């Protein structure tokens, strides 16, 4: 299942921590929010790696740290040996060319007063790319499925549909031939029929351009469709990590199980229990396993002798099953599925 | 089904665009009995929200409506403003997608619900307050939160308040337009459970409008698929969502991968349809392969 396991990682993250000062309405000393709290993983070249979790779990913050858009508190990111947090000026620009991003809302990524041609050419100009600009722009647009490209050169974002806008954003990203493309909920604002096309496009381009694709999403069904490996995040930590086949069909962590239970499925009515409440506040992370206040295994008294550890000891991201990691005391003790 | 609640017959809605009329809803028939749950699905621009607004007489001025919409024994089309006002809330209530914009941001949410009750029913303020607190409890909101302002609620809680508000005057029919679209998966599941539970407890009929077929699997008994202003397939949710017959429904259902299903590993099948745009004149036949004539929708 895993791609190029033997090769050097395309991207490596080690003990990454991103903190934000939490704001108080009337001054006062706000605490600190640990949005990403000690995250480590590798992504191999050519892989589709999916980071999934509820809103507020830190998946977007993690994505931004990968891009060097915010400075981590500690830990490191390494993409082809470069850490964006340690780069300045020209070096940082070189790094940014290699790591491109597609955000959720294409309208927010495009300048409404810039034509499609300008939007795609801008990155090339910033990075001082050689070659015939017009030709490269045309090729990028055509690759992104906007054909014939010349027809779109002078269009403005408001004249395009949502799917077309996202294609323009993708064209601008791939015009730079990045090594890594981070796609943060690339289709969640698009209609069902267009979603398939855009995901199809991303995967096709991944092979054509030879990129590594990092897909950030809350939708496990799309992770199932596309990902080679999946990392499930909860309150700033990776709680489960492994090949999509294992994580999504034989989950080890009770949180993954709950997420799967609410993943909407056409044609089947849900029978599983729905977690109550909303994800806890990252400014007040519960002690022990941070999932314990919502954990169904604990609630049904199935944690057995592990229960005191769940309440008091932070579980490590162990490997209860070879190749399949999970941060759960119960899973670690049993070496099998928790539910 | 005990008696028809809502009966839509040959409904056409035309918007006047630059001097010409473009049909957004083009000959739709629907019927909903008391306690029924019908899901209406389709992509943006297919006319599903226009249909909902027509049922409440809320269409903008540039819209022309033809056909018939009967709610119990009231004809909605062409009804007098007073008659429509009586129908809204007490007859048909609506839950909108953006709960934030549906509330007045500078009034406490409890007061807004009380106001709706007082406008429609001859009860005292304290009776109305009592009912409001009861509704909050039913919708899973602590009654003490009635004194909070809309911005103090999270997206999911705000949607619960929205639902409590829709139930203020005990309407027999609730229309929910994309009730969970902006919400996270876990919260979405909670809201859908709530809708299903309230429907059961109060025998409310639901018309759920969404672009997301997976929502309908949770709340609807029957599903109608809308495309280019027409209903192209209608049937029981369990059948239509597993074995759709119309090519358009097939492609919509196929766009949702199923976790664990080996067949949906790999990119979701793209929908081959090019989306129709609103344009004047008779609608061109939807450009999907093998569309049966619109006069005979496939029955699932």
Image (cartoon, coloured by chain):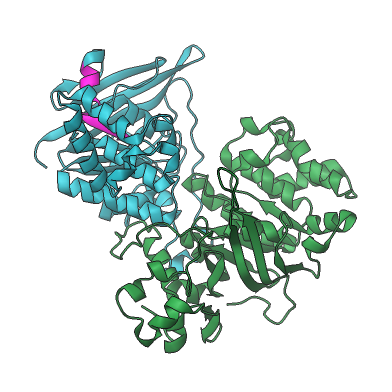
Whether residue A28 sits left or right of residue B230 in the image: it is right
Query: Which chain did the renderer colour green?
Result: A
Q: Quadrant of residue A261?
A: bottom left
Q: Which residues are magenta?
A: B83-95
Which chain: cyan?
A: B
Rendered location of residue A224, percent (x, y) = 49, 66
x then y, percent, for residue A202: 63, 56
Say whether residue B98 is visible: no
Residue A146 position (above or below residue A249): above
Give the total number of marks visible in the rendering: 0
- Residue A11 is situated, as x and y percent measured from the top left of the image, at 72, 69
Q: Is residue A166 above or below residue B9?
A: below
**Side of A229 relative to B178 (left or right):** right
Q: Where is residue A183? Give x, y as percent.
A: 63, 55
Pick whichever, A3 or A207, lies toward us: A3
Q: Residue at x 22, y 51 (%)?
A: B197
Q: Residue A243: in sight, yes or no?
A: yes
State yes or no: residue A23 in magenta: no
State the residue in front, A20 or B34: A20
Quadrant occupied by the C terminus of chain A: bottom left
Task: Please check the rendered image and state whether residue B85 is part of the magenta-colored stretch, yes or no.
Answer: yes
Seen as rendered, the residue at the extreme left is B2
The quarter of the rendered structure image containing the N terminus of chain A is bottom right
Q: Is residue A162 above or below residue B58?
A: below
Q: Residue at x 41, y 73 (%)?
A: A254
With respect to residue B260, does B287 lie above or below? above
């Amino acid at each position: 299942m895993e791609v190029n396991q033997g090769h050097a990682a395309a991207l490596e993250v080690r003990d990454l921590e991103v903190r934000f000062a939490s704001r108080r309405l009337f001054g006062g000393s706000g605490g600190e929010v640990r949005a990403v709290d000690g995250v480590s993983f590798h992504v191999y070249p050519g892989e589709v790696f999916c980071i999934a979790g509820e809103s507020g779990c830190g998946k977007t913050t993690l994505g931004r740290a990968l891009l060097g858009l915010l400075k981590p508190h500690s830990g490191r990111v390494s993409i082809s040996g470069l850490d964006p947090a340690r780069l300045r000026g020209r070096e940082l620009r070189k790094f940014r060319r290699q790591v491109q991003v597609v955000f959720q809302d294409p309208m927010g990524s495009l300048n409404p007063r810039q034509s499609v041609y300008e939007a795609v050419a801008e990155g090339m100009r910033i990075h001082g790319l050689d070659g015939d600009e017009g030709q490269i722009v045309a090729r990028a647009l055509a690759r992104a499925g906007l054909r014939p490209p010349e027809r779109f050169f002078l269009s403005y974002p408001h004249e395009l549909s949502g799917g077309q806008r996202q294609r323009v954003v993708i064209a601008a990203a791939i015009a730079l031939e990045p090594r890594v493309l981070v796609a943060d909920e690339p289709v969640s604002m698009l209609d069902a029929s267009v979603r398939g096309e855009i995901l199809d496009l991303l995967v096709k381009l991944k092979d054509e351009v030879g990129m590594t694709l990092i897909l950030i999403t809350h939708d496990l069904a799309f992770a199932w469709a596309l990902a080679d490996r999946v990392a499930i995040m909860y309150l700033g930590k990776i709680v489960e990590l492994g090949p999509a086949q294992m994580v999504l069909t034989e989950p080890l962590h009770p949180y993954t199980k709950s997420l799967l239970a609410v993943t909407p499925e056409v044609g089947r009515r849900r029978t599983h229990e729905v977690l109550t409440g909303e994800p806890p506040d990252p400014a007040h992370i519960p002690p022990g396993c941070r999932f314990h206040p919502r954990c169904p295994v604990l609630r049904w008294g199935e944690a057995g002798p592990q229960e005191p550890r769940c309440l008091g000891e932070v579980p490590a991201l162990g490997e209860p099953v070879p190749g399949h990691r999970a941060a759960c005391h119960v899973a670690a003790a049993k070496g099998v599925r928790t539910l | 089904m005990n008696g028809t609640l809502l009966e839509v017959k040959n409904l056409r809605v035309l918007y006047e665009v630059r001097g010409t009329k473009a049909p957004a809803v083009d000959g739709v028939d629907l019927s909903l009995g008391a306690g029924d749950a019908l899901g209406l699905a389709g992509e943006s621009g297919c006319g599903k929200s226009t249909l909902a607004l027509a049922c409440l007489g809320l269409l903008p001025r540039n819209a022309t409506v033809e056909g018939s919409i009967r709610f119990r024994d009231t004809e909605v089309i062409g009804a007098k403003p007073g008659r429509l006002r009586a129908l809204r809330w007490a007859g048909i209530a609506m839950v909108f997608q953006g709960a934030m914009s549906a509330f007045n941001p500078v009034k406490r949410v409890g007061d807004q619900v009380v106001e709706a009750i007082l406008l429609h029913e001859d009860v005292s303020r304290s009776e109305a307050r009592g009912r409001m607190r009861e509704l909050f409890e039913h919708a899973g909101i602590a009654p003490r939160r009635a004194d909070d302002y809309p911005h103090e609620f999270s997206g999911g809680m705000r949607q619960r308040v929205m639902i409590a508000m829709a139930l203020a005057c005990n309407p027999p029919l609730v229309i929910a337009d994309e009730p969970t679209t902006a919400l996270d998966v876990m919260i979405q599941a909670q809201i859908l459970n709530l809708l299903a539970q309230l429907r059961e407890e109060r025998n409310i009929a639901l018309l759920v409008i969404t672009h997301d077929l997976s929502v309908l699997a949770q709340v609807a008994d029957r599903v109608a698929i809308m495309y280019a202003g027409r209903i192209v397939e209608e049937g029981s949710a369990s059948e239509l969502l597993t074995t759709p017959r119309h090519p358009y429904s097939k492609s919509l259902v196929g766009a949702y991968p199923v976790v664990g299903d080996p067949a949906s590993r790999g990119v979701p099948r793209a929908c081959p349809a090019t989306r129709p745009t609103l344009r004047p004149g008779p609608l061109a036949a939807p450009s999907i392969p093998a569309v049966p004539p619109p006069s005979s929708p496939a029955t699932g």
